[in-house]
Amino acid sequence: MTMSGTVRTRNKTVTGLLLVLPCVAITLNLMVWAVAVSNSGFWADDFLWVTHFSRSLGDLSNYHFNVGKYIINAFWALGTEAFGDGSVVPFLMLNSVVFATGVIMWLWAGTKERWSSVEAWWIGGLFIATAAWLPTTLWSSNITHSGGFLALGVGVVAHGHVMRARNARDAQSWSALSGAAWTFAVASNLLYIGLIVIAAYCTWHQIARFRHFGVKTPVAALTVGSWSLLLPIAYFVAIGYPGTTSSSPYAMTGLQFLHENIRFYKLLLAPTDLLTAVYVVLLLGGVIGAFAALRRKDYFPIAVLGAAGATALPALVQSQQRFVNYMAMPLLLLLSAFVAGAQPVLRGKSKRAKNVILVTAVVALLLLFHQGGEIRAYFTSSPYGSNLATFRSQVASFTPEGATICAELDLDASQEALFIAEISGENGFRVPPIDAARAYLVRNAKECPANGPAAHITVRASARDDFVVSE
């Protein structure tokens, strides 16, 4: 074997060894995802959307009903047309495909010049190890978050095509797609207005690219700025923000909630001093790398780091809504900013510095994976809608299809509120296997307002706080 062949073989071996840990972390998490999907059921808002957008986009003028998130209309209209409403599994799979496509596109786009393919696997492995993404893919209604990841991926891939375009016409087409992606991000979820920081970075470079093709600066700035910045901001102001805040769970925001929310997410993601230190290292490393990149006139790391903070802030000022997956996008961007900022070290000649980063990455991966164990355990034992699916099957065994149901709630106040939220009131009774024509939830069977024959059932809580039904 020649010397060059020996070197190539050695390099492949080293690359393979470097990929073992992140690949194992990703594989084990995907196993959890597969188990959870197979045991999940429709849950909470799923019932609302599947009944109101069954094979229909609904009333597109009503942005209060969908809380300004038009991805809801499209996802459920397409899903019910393709899958019907008998099982949540295909909806979860479609939701997961949207999420995974966005993450993969983001990491793949970065391999062009921001990080190597091995580093992309490590970013993905560290991100997946946190398990913060699992609630996004294991609740169909969280398509509003998966859409944000897809928008991120499409936005940066389209931007890359703009920068590699050979003529102004191609550049304009890809730039328009990139701009549409940033608007789509806000139409998916208000949180992703934070991606406007990356959109601004892309806009700046796209303007320079159009100038290269002879387009005057004011024209290029107006064109690219309109669809990359003006449209998403206008959507946020005119539709996204008023639509979201019109819903009571999202109505109250303020800096006074910042401290408690930080404590909540720290408890979930970094409850130990060692894990806190890991996040501090990632943040400080990202900041140092970003400012070092600024000296080289490279604005990408600071833009990604800024987007991480800008997507985290809307969740941190919420009064009620606290879910670990709200931190998934900030985590992906933080990890990406750290690696992008560390490129001079990773591509340098200092083996000691590279080894320090590798050891830090290995320790971080092991700690993050360990901490994500509680989230993974939750979804393997009781994924969203699993217990409710049993209850709904019981109701179906007691009631005929197409019947009117009077459900007497023999529950205390907290149990009743939880039951109504999980089954989305009447909506959960109108989906298979129950398929009721109407359903009334009452405290006393005599109060049921049904006109004509009705199937009467009683809802109680078991000793394990599962909902059960009796005639």
Image: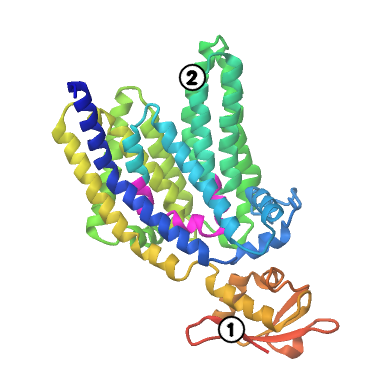
Task: Say few, some or many: other residues with alpha carbon within 10 Å of mark 2 (under 14 / 14 to 19 / 20 or more).
Answer: few
Q: CA distance from mark 1 to mark 2?
A: 60 Å
Earlier sequence position, callout 1 versus callout 2: 2
In depth, the one of 73 and 67 nearer the eye is 73
Can the viewer see residue 119?
A: yes
68 above or below 14?
A: below
In depth, the one of 43 and 243 nearer the eye is 43
Q: Is residue 131 left or right of residue 72?
A: left
User: Disc 2 designates what residue?
Assistant: 164
The number of numbered badges drawn on the structure is 2
Q: Which residues are magenta?
A: 125-147
77 above or below 435?
A: above
Q: Which mark is residue 468?
A: 1
Q: Is residue 192 left or right of residue 32?
A: right
Residue at x 26%, y 50% (from the top left corner): 364
Q: Name the quadrant containing residue 219.
A: top right
Q: Quick one: which residue is furthest to the right in this view?
A: 452
Residue at x 28%, y 30% (from the top left corner): 343
The kind of secondary structure element at disc 2 is helix
Residue 338, horizontal then vertical, whole percent = 31, 39
Residue at x 60%, y 78% (from the top left corner): 391
The three-letter amino acid code for the residue at tag 1 is Val
The three-letter amino acid code for the residue at tag 2 is Arg
Residue at x 53%, y 45% (from the top left corner): 148
Residue 73, horizontal then vertical, whole percent = 68, 51
